[in-house]
Amino acid sequence: MANKKSIEGVVTKNLRLIPDERGRLMEILRADDKEFSKFGQVYVTTAYPGVVKAWHYHKIQDDNMTALKGMVKIVLYDDRTDSPTKGLINEFIVGDHNHILVHIPKNVWHGFKCISDEEAMIVNLVTECYNYSAPDEYRKPPHGSDIPYDWSRKDG
């Protein structure tokens, strides 16, 4: 994470892989998890190596994201005026080598970048169904917006 302090309302859950001789199983989100509030829909999105899909937020919907394949960097930015963590950025490295779920509350800017050499596959369990006629999605470009974040790799 870019900052050790978590953005207000952001929660992570370690996901447990259960392997056996047939393959493996991984529970992502259960109705009795503290991260669960409501079911809207589940969707899968992918990104090719180096691709950034950002920035956006929702006014109604919470997101619950994890990577099923590949590696991604999920980045959150708290721009909520009434938040005690306003201005904070959180980074999460998620995927094949770190199986976690990231709960992203409404009104928090977020996006992700594929950081693996292969296409990354992300599953998002959201609290609302997508409204085709009035989408609950508010966007900014990934580069050059007023969000103080640089998507380039940080070598060192």
Image (cartoon, helix red, strand yellow):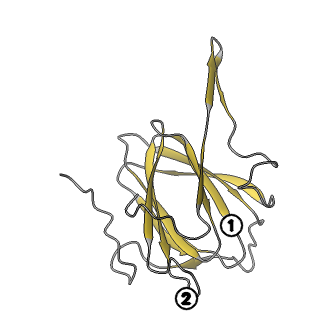
| Front residue of this view, candidates 33 and 26 | 33
Badge 1 element: loop
Residue farthest along the left direction in this orientation: 156
| Secondary structure found at label 2 | loop
Give the residue displayed 60% in from the left and 58% down from the top: 11
Image quadrant containing the N terminus:
bottom left
Residue depth check, mark 1 versus mark 2: number of the one nearer the observer:
2
- The residue at 57%/81% (across/down) is 83
Q: Three-letter amino acid code at disc 2?
A: Thr
Q: Position of residue 105 (x, y in %)?
A: 64, 68
Query: Badge 2 is on which residue?
Result: 81
Which residue is nearer to you in this view: 111 or 85?
85
112 or 33: nearer the viewer: 33
In this rendering, position of residue 132 left or right of residue 144: right
Q: Position of residue 14 (x, y in %)?
A: 58, 42
**In the displayed structure, does residue 117 sit left or right of residue 140?**
left
CA separation in Å, label 1 and label 2: 18 Å
- Residue 12 to residue 77: above or below: above
Residue on which disc 1 sits: 62
At label 1, counting other C-alpha atoms closer than 10 Å, the crowd grade (few under 14, some 14-19, many 20 or more) is many
> Mark 1 or mark 2: which comes first in sequence?
1
The relative height of residue 81 versus residue 76 in the rendered view (above or below) is: below
The type of residue carrying mark 1 is Asp
Q: Residue at x 56, y 74 (%)?
A: 108
Q: Going 43% across and 69% down the picture, which residue do you hit?
A: 89
